[in-house]
Image (cartoon, helix red, strand yellow):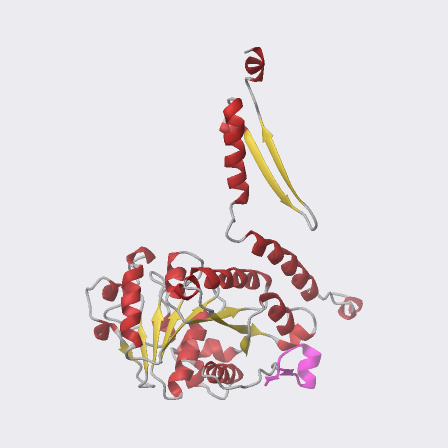
Amino acid sequence: MSVFSFFTRTRSAPVARDRLQILLAHERALSGRADLAAILREEILAVIAKHVSIDPEKVNVKLERGDHVSTLEVNVEMLDLAKVGAE
Amino acid sequence: MSKVMVVTSGKGGVGKTTSSASLGAALAQSGQNVVLIDFDVGLRNLDLVMGAERRVVFDLVNVVQGDAKLPQALIRDKRIETLSLLPASQTRDKDALTEDGVQKVIEELREKFDWIICDSPAGIEKGAQLAMRFADMAVVVTNPEVSSVRDSDRIIGMLDSKTLRAENGDNFEKHLLLTRYSAARAARGEMLNVKDVLEILAIPLLGIVPESPDVLNASNLGCPVTLHNPESVAAKAYLEAARRLCGEKLEVVEPVERKSLMGRLFGRKAAMA
């Protein structure tokens, strides 16, 4: 550590406080429905499966939380869409 | 009127057992009848911290399962006669406890004691849920550190939803005990300060226990710090917290660390007050 860095010591506590405040705001909003992504996955799949046969292993549900908006991304691989179309 | 108080935190290693022992001893030192229950089945330690590890015959699981009567399992403290301990089992796991069994034990203890202090295991699973289930109030032990604060927030949410009182729509009293606090590091902005933690967790402050060698020393000797070294900063913090639990309006004073000139130059703590 140089002599200079002694005077410009980083103050990490304010960063800790801000990170906690953002994180806990999200976690409190989600408490009680902690498995939101799992519930959405289940219900969306049930709807799709009514019309198209799908492989549950080839489904990817991603819930991304941002500061202002959260996004839900659902990727479903539909193998036999050609067959469905031909019916 | 007896009070059932759970000492909890979510995170492990923040000082639940030390705080249970110290608050229990402090309350008993003021003449009240206190029983400490160790809910950490499989990983008991309250017996060790209380210096009673060689006197354990029966435990909480034995009583819950009807293999022993409650008075047989209670260990009376040798130094404070109004203090008792109900140890956890070391050889069983948390599934050995049942909700009905725990409720019966607590009801029976309510008849004899002013304070029933439940030392919760870490985590949010069955053991921790049973420790808080029948409580009237909680002491949430938190270190000024991000993971501890996050886990405390989670536990506060559970106290407000999973306790019997909360389910009955009653208000659940919660107190924050900030432990391992270093005033000097907080002042330098290297550690979350009291104000930060209080703002985030938003529950009333019961006390601030400074990081202190006396705490480790006391547990090495198997004697609560309030008894072993009542003049130490940590003991004073616990003794004052106990008075606040009894309803005394004592202001919480943030500890200050004093450093001698040599201490300042070499970064060593010369004295703490």
The residue drawn where x is 40% and y is 88% is B30
Is B67 situated left or right of B28 in this image? left
The residue drawn where x is 50% and y is 31% is A46
Name above or below for residue B129 compared with residue B272: above
The residue drawn where x is 44% and y is 58% is B124
| Nearer to me, B78 or B171 | B171
The stretch of residues the image draws in magenta is B256-273
Is residue B113 located in the magenta-colored stretch of the structure?
no
Name above or below for residue A18 compared with residue A30: below
The extreme right residue here reads A4
The quarter of the picture where residue B47 lies is bottom left
Q: Would residue B11 be seen by someone viewing this image from the given angle?
A: no
The extreme front residue here reads B169
Q: Would residue B186 be seen by someone viewing this image from the given angle?
A: yes
Q: What is the x, y in percent for residue B89?
A: 29, 64
Q: What is the x, y in percent for residue A66?
A: 68, 48
Is A3 situated left or right of B15 in this image? right
Q: What is the x, y in percent for residue B212?
A: 53, 78
Q: How many marks?
A: 0
| Nearer to me, B9 or A68 | A68
Q: What is the x, y in percent for residue B197?
A: 61, 69
Is A12 situated left or right of B243 in this image? right
Quadrant where the image shows the N terminus of chain A? bottom right
Is B27 situated left or right of B73 in this image? right
| Nearer to me, B217 or B50 | B50
Quadrant where the image shows the C terminus of chain A? top right
The quarter of the picture where residue B261 lies is bottom right
Is residue B261 located in the magenta-colored stretch of the structure?
yes
Name above or below for residue B227 compared with residue B61: below
The quarter of the picture where residue B8 lies is bottom left
